Amino acid sequence: MIRTGTDIVEVNRVRKIIKSYGNKFLSKIFTKAEIVYCNSQRDPAVHFAGKFSAKESIKKALSKEFRISSLKFNKLSILNDDNGRPYLDTNLFPISNLDISISHTKTHAISVAILSNA
């Protein structure tokens, strides 16, 4: 392991921002694939919060290699594999030695990003 990043987000905060700003907020923060995925879930705000948290964790883990302000949220795409495990889409951001994990409840989403030597 080289570096880690972690973040926690209140789901209701994300829910309120989506309600207030709608697609303007979503398109600034999330990719089209993320928006489609989250909106397909029973409670999209929980999943948007999880992906937002993961993006914050990734930025923190990469903060020594990149200026955090240069890492745009909608250039970091968090997808899910067939088992539901989240991963960073390397087609948009080509870094392969990063692992992420997201957990959430109805009220909070938390994530961790681990940047490894490999």
Image (cartoon, rainbow, N blue to C red):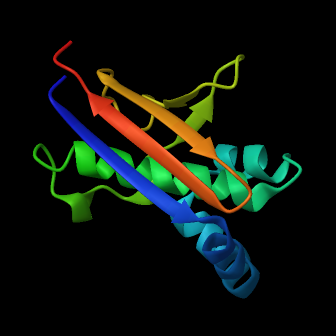
| Above or below for 114 versus 33 | above
Kindly indicate the quadrant of the structure image that contains residue 15: bottom right
Asked if residue 80 shows in the view, the reply is: yes
Q: Quadrant of the N terminus?
A: top left
Left/right placement of residue 117 relative to residue 78 reads left
At 51% from the left and 42% from the top, the residue drawn is 77
Of 10 and 40, nearer the camera is 10
| Above or below for 4 versus 8 | above
Q: Position of residue 54 (x, y in %)?
A: 46, 47
| Above or below for 30 versus 40 | below
At 15% from the left and 57% from the top, the residue drawn is 67
Q: Position of residue 2 (x, y in %)?
A: 14, 28
Q: Position of residue 79 (x, y in %)?
A: 60, 34
Q: Position of residue 50 (x, y in %)?
A: 59, 50
Outermost residue to the right: 42
Kindly indicate the quadrant of the structure image that contains residue 93: top left
Kindly indicate the quadrant of the structure image that contains residue 65: top left
At 26% from the left and 51% from the top, the residue drawn is 60
Outermost residue to the top: 118
